[in-house]
Image (spheres, rainbow, N blue to C red):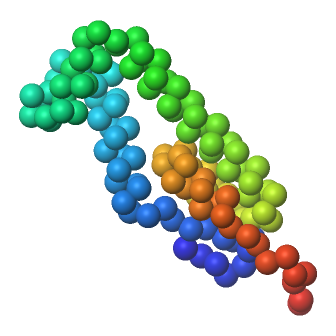
Amino acid sequence: MARAASGEYFRRSSLFWMATITVSMGYFTWAVFWPQQVPYEALGPIGAFSKHMVEHHYPLLYYGWWFAWSVHVAEAIYSLKLCSDKGIDSLFSRFLWCLQTFLFGIASLSLLLKYRPDPRPKRH
């Protein structure tokens, strides 16, 4: 959450979105790559829906998983361009934005999109 200078700006996503996206993508990965190990009955309506998708629409799940991660990769690359456009030139800050956006997608990218650097020139 550094804000010492606009070139070093970084803001962490909220814990709610980090947890939600981690659990969701983790479950998605589990259902796609280890569907026989998922305890569908214990998961209520989500489990029933997942079991139906695995049994009747598995290719959609498989390619959807790859598509979801491709979107995360594209968002991470876009975050690097946004960092350049907004004057964030610290390599560490750019790395953090790229990594966070890769892992948490739009929850991170929206924070970077909202960031408005100070347009006034810096005085030394």
Q: Give coordinates of residue 121: x percent, y percent.
A: 90, 81
**In which quadrant of the rendered image does the N terminus lie?**
bottom right
How many numbered tags mark residues here? 0
Between 79 and 40, the one lying in front of the other is: 40
Q: Residue at the far bottom: name it.
A: 124
Picture layout, residue 123 above or below residue 2? below
Between 96 and 32, the one lying in front of the other is: 32
Q: Residue 42 appears in which quarter of the rendering?
A: top left
**In the image, is 92 to the left or to the right of 69?**
right
Picture layout, residue 21 above or below residue 92? above
Picture layout, residue 26 above or below residue 87? above
**In the image, is 71 to the left or to the right of 80?**
left
**In which quadrant of the rendered image does the C terminus lie?**
bottom right
* Residue positioned 24% across, 17% down in the render: 52
* Residue positioned 76% across, 49% down in the render: 81
Q: Residue 84 appears in which quarter of the rendering?
A: bottom right
Decide if residue 79 is in sight here: yes
* Residue positioned 13% across, 34% down in the render: 44
